[in-house]
Image: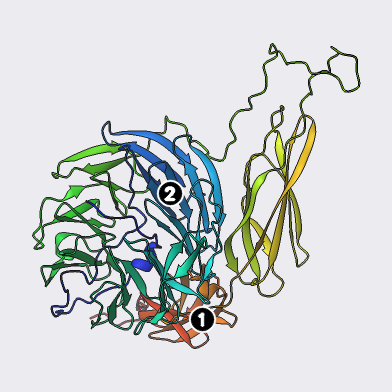
Amino acid sequence: MTGYLGGHRARERRARLLAWAVIPVMLVAGVLLGIRFGPDLLSTSDGLTWLSDAVRGEAVQVNPDTGRQENRLKVAPAGNQIDLAQREGLLVVTDKTTGTLTVIDPSALVTSGRWFGSGGGAVEVLLNKELLYVVDRLRGMVQRLDPLNARPLGPAWSAGGLIADAALDGRNTVWALRGDGMLSSLAWAPETNALTETAPPVRVRAAGPRSLVIPHDQGVTVVASEAGVVSRVGTGDDSVVEIPPVPGKINPAPQAPSDLVPVSAADSGKVLLFHRGRAITIDTGGMGCARPGEPVVFHGRVYVGCEGVGKVLVLGRDGERRSDIKVPAGAPKLTVNDDKLFIHVDGADTGVIVGRDGKISSTVTRDETQPVNDPDSPPPSKSPSKGSRQNPSPAAGGAPGATSSPPGPKVPAAPGGVGIAAQFEYGTTLRVEASWEAPADNGSAITGFSLVLTSDRGFSKSLSLTALRSGAIEIPCNTRCHGLRVQAEVSAANANGPGAVGRGSYTHNAPAVAPGAGDTVVTSAGAEEATRTTFRGEAAFNPPFAWRTFEGSCTLNYSGPATGSRPVSCWATTLSFTFTGGSGTYRFWMQAGPVKSNEVQTFGYHEPIEPPPCSRCQIP
């Protein structure tokens, strides 16, 4: 499959596209959806592929020719959401949980630089063969980075508000959609060393904070699924099409040819194929695939991972079913690279490789006998050997021919690349992590690091560490965390003492964002009988950033045989409570002010009361 590398966006943000009602012919030349690129699309020329393992926080390199694992890298804390992007000589790891972008030299397996942004899935990477951009949607900025060290190149472009989504098309144009529906097209201007708007911003009909931008070879499609409007902009054949809105999670293909564009409805158990101007609806639920994942087009076939059932569906151009592919249980990830399709599951021991002819082979994706490399670990010190000779130099002010002793080991130099990344904000607390690059040890091995972290609101903490990162540190904000400034001072020590101090700072730019109606906040809820009239309620939450930073109060509400509400922190992840009610179906939702989240249903049941045995009944 040919194409270009596009933007990386959070998987949860792919969940909105098209309706399953009969859709009129609306694909002109099949480019309404066009080509879209997700975080698992990689490009490399050496035949090796990096796959992410979020369960372990690792990036695993596999060799499709041998079916073996080549390398394992520790790139994030276990369980964090990881996106990978690669081109020849470059591996970019985005920890979307913390907002940290790490550039790794794959030939040396060492970190060459970092960039720190907003956490909670707000950071995206836009990468192709020439350019590396990072988008911080929360800060509303796009920054070009040096692929050698992740340092900014030129000033950041500011959208002047929240960025809903951004993408990089095949002509090196960056498209940034602001939360109010204004779409800007940007290009790199070498003469000014800056991103420059190529035309005045345009307002896209019905677009808002949850709209999606899909890149094409030229231009983009903006999907405002919540309003049922799809707009093409900058394609040379711009149009606006109205479609029926669809609730629930929708997964578009990250890349597809213009005449074969699949999307899947995870909550409806369906896949929709746009083929030669037709919309074909496929009931994957009837194929044992109740929750279809992100579809991928590979050499004329459509591959759809099925969550939780250990298989991938293979469909033809007209939706006809081919032989399924067995995979480990879980949520299959599909990656096209080097004209091969890689299928893997986080935490699994093996994966599947599909060739262009459809032939299947396997590869190892977890080899515990192979060590896990830490790209942050400094290389071994290369001090002169004891037997080496130093060229003498004349002693200052001494007699001719007199020599001075070679200088002995010194304290380390100052650490470079000191940075602070915001991991999570909840209430009036900000969780951050500090990291830095190893300095020169100046002849004596480094034994540890000293970190002093302070804020402009009275916080101070000192740590002694042996790694190049601090781990999570919670900082009180006193009131709002927006505007909090944090500074890190780091020094390394060796046998000769502490060295020079390296400094870095971070200002938390997180203005309050209004929660969106229908946002997925409540992930599960249950009601278990406690007494004859009461239930023990349990609810779990995964609040988006706008809910976590809401400045008002939040409640968990329920309705059914009984109604009520419970106060809950807007950043809560669980809540246990007791409520009174009879048997029946209960609906739970979270509310921030007047805004309602998604709903979750559960059935509460009371065992019927059996009458006591009759002690004085008349015997017939």
Q: Nearer the viewer, mark 1 or mark 2?
A: 1
Above or below, 239 against 63 in this view is: below
Whether residue 236 can be seen here: yes
Above or below, 88 against 132 in this view is: above
Q: Position of residue 297 (x, y in %)?
A: 20, 56
* Side of 559 relative to 4 (left or right): right
Q: Position of residue 94 (x, y in %)?
A: 47, 54
Q: Amino acid at mark 1?
A: Ala
Q: Amino acid at mark 2?
A: Val
The residue lying at 68 percent from left, 62 percent from top is: 475
The residue that mark 2 highlights is 55
Secondary element under disc 2, as helix, strand or loop, is loop
The residue closer to the viewer here, 358 or 549, is 358
* Side of 183 relative to 408 (left or right): left
Residue 514 circle label = 1
The residue closer to the viewer here, 325 or 211, is 211
Q: Quadrant of residue 31?
A: bottom left
The residue closer to the viewer here, 363 or 386, is 386
The residue lying at 38 percent from left, 33 percent from top is: 70
